[in-house]
Amino acid sequence: MIESRALAAAVLACLALHSAKAAEQATELETVVVTAPLRDKVSDSAMPVTVLKGEELQLKMGRSIGETLKLEQGMSSQSFGPGVGTPVIRGQTGPRVRVLANGIGANDASAISPDHATSIEPTLAERIEVLRGPATLLYGSGAIGGVVNVIDNRIPGFRPDKLLGGAVEQRYDSVADEKTTALKFEGGKDQFAYHLDGFYRERNNMDIGGRAIDVDAVRVSDPTLDVVNNPQGVLPNTWGHTISGSAGLSWVGDPGFAGASYNRLENNYGVPDDGTGKETVRIDLRQNKYDFKSELNDPFPFAKLIRSRLGYTDYQHTEIANGEKGAFFSNETFEGRLELTHQDIGPVRGVVGFQAQSSDFFGEHYHHHKDEGGGEDHAGEEEHVEVEVLVPRSLIQSFSVFGVESLDLGPVTYQLGLRVEQTSIDPKSGPSFDYTPVSASASASWKIDDSNRLNLAITRSSRAPQVQELLSNGFHHATRSFERGDTSLTEETSYNLDLGYRFNASWMRAEVDLFHNWANHYIYLRRTGEFVNEHGEPCLGNEECAPLVVSSQGDATFKGYEAKLIFPLMETSYGLLDMTLFSDYTRGEFAQGGDVPRMPPLRYGVQFDYTLDELSSYVRYTRADSQPYAGDFESKTDGYNLLNVGVDYQVQAYQDAKLMVFAKGNNLLNENIRNSTSYLRNFAPEPGRGAEVGIRITY
C-alpha cells in the first residue's frame, strides 16, 4: 500500500500545479500514418490504425513492444517473463505480426519461438504505428494480425535546425527495482545531419501478486512435473540487463536525403523457473544491425517519390542452462525494399515496390556429458559436448512485388492492393521447399457526412511455412518441450473481412471495428499429450522427459471486435475531462472442432483522462473475463481486474529546453494475473503492484 499511497500523492501534487484555462491549449495537427501505403491521415484510413507518440507514448512505454501496446484496442502481449513481450494483435503473433524498425524487419528470432525477445526496443522510439487490414501486405504476405512499426530518427531525414539537440531520460520501476537511462543526441549543419543514442536497463527479480506457479494448471499440460519450490510474491530468475547504442549520419538536400546507421544491442534475461529446482535458463542475446535509407523527390516525370531501404542484421543468442550452453540460434539477414509513389493519375494515387530478403538461419542444442576417469575425487573426469541440430542450417530467400492503388470518388475512397512473393527454404542437407504466396486486398472508406464514416476491407493473405515449423526437431530448454516440425506443411491462406464505423460529434466519439477471419491450413504448435526424452524417443523408466509439441495445420476461424466510446464530461477553465468506455474480444476455433490455443480473453473497462495546460493524467480500470477456451492439453485462465493510473507534467526548463516528469501506478489491486496468450502463464504471472516514476529533458 505504500507504493499506491506515494503514487496517489504524486498525482494530487501534479493536479495542483496549474490553474490556467484549458481553452488556450494548442490544437495538434491531425496525425499522418507514415507506415500506411500513401501516408494517409488517421481519420481517412479505411483500416484500424493505432499511433502512439509524444506524451502518450512516454507514459505507456514498457520494457518491450508487447508491454507498450498491451492495453491498446485489440492488442496484448505474449509475455515469457519480463524479458520477453512480443505483440499480439487479434489473437495473432509470431510470423503473423511483422515487427519493423523504420519500415524494415527486425530479422531476429522472436517469430521463431515465444521465449525469444524482439531486438527492436521501444525505449528510444519517437512513435509506434500499428496497422491492421489491407495495408499490411506492403510489408509481408503473412502479417494477417498486423504490422508494428517502431519509428525513430536513427537515420535523419530532415535538415536539423541546430547543431546539438536531443533528450535525456531516467526511469525507475519499483516492481523489479528496474532502472533505465536513455540518451539521444542529434543535430547537424548545412546538409549533414547526425543521430546518436543509447540506453541501459537493469532490473532485479520481479514482484508478483501471489504464488509464482499454478500447480493445478501446470498438471493439465505436464502431470509429471514435480514442483518443489513455489515462491510467494517474487518471480525468481527474472533479473536482467540490456544495453544498446546507435549512430546515424545523413546527407539532406532539396532532392531528398540518404543516410546510414549502425546499432549494437546486448540483452541478457532469465526464463522463470519451473519450480523443480533442476534447471535455470538464461538467454544472452547479441545483435549488430546496419541500415541504409534514402528518399528522392520527383526523380523523373512519372515518379513523385522513390524510397529505398537496405538492412543487414547479424543476430544470435545463446540459451544458458545451469551455467552451460544449452542452445544457440543464429540469424544473418539481408533485407531491402524499393517503393515508388507515382504521380496522381486523375483521382488515382498509388505506390508500387519490390522487396527481397535473404537469411542464413540455424539452431543447435548441446548435450553435456561427463565421463569419470577414476580416483576418489574423480580427477580424471572429462566433459563431452554432443551437438544436436535443433533447426538445420538453411538459406531462406524471398522476393516480392507489391502495389497499392487508391481511387478517390467523392465521399468514397477505394483502395486495391496486391502482393506476389516467391519464397524458398534450402536446408544444408535435405530437400528444399518452394512457395509462391499471393495476397490481395480491397477496401472502401465512405465519408457519409462530417460525423459518420463507414469502412469495409476484404483481404486475402497467404504465407509460406517458416523454417522451424517445417524442420525443427529437438529439445528446447527455454520452452521445456521437445519441438518437432512437419515437412508436409502447405501454405496458410486467410480471408479476412473487416467492417469499421467512426462517429465524431461534440458530445461523443465512437470507433467500432468488427472482423471475421477464415484461415485455411492454419499453422500452430500443438501439444500432443505425449512425453519424450531429450532425443525425441518415448520415455522409459525414470529418465527425464518433456512434453512433445508438433507443428500442425487445420482450418480455423477468428472473429471479434474492438470498440471505444469517448465522452467529453467537462471542458472548463478547470481543465478537460473525458470518459472512455472500451472493449475488445477475439474467439479462435478450429473447423474440425476444438479451440485455437493462447487466445486473449474478453476485456472491457473505463478510462478517465484529465488535462489542464501542461498536465495530463488518467485512471484506467480493465476487467478481463476468464478464458475457458484454452485448447487441447492447455489450462484455462481466470479473469482479473486491472487498475492503472498515470500522470505527466511538462514545463519550459530553460530557453528551448523542456522538462517532463511522469509517474505511473500499475496493477494497483496487486492481482496475480495469468496471461492467457503466454506459453509460460502457469509459471510466470504478470507484474504485481508497482510504481514507476521518470524524468525526461529535451533540448
Image: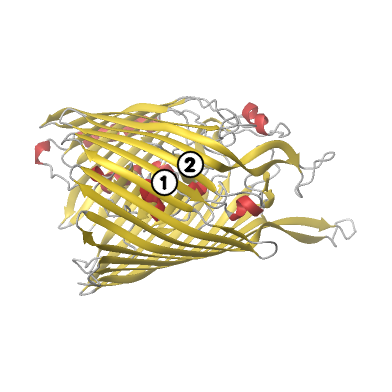
The quadrant in which residue 72 appears is: top left
Residue at figure coordinates x 59%, y 49% from the top left: 490
Residue 146 marker: 1
Contact flag, marks 1 and 2 (Cβ < 8 Å): yes
Quadrant containing the C terminus in the rendered view: bottom left
Quadrant containing the N terminus in the rendered view: top left
Report the side of 658 relative to 140 (left or right): left
- Residue 14 drawn above or below residue 303: above
Between the C-alphas of marks 1 and 2, the distance is 8 Å
Q: Of the residues shown, which amino acid type is indicated by label 2?
A: Gln
Which circle's residue, 1 or 2, is located before the other in the chain? 2
Q: Position of residue 591 (x, y in %)?
A: 56, 32
Q: Determine if residue 303 is in view.
A: yes
- Residue 314 drawn above or below residue 412: below
Q: Position of residue 443 (x, y in %)?
A: 32, 44
Residue 92 marker: 2
Alpha-carbon neighbours of circle 2 within 10 Å: few (<14), some, or many (≥20)? Answer: many
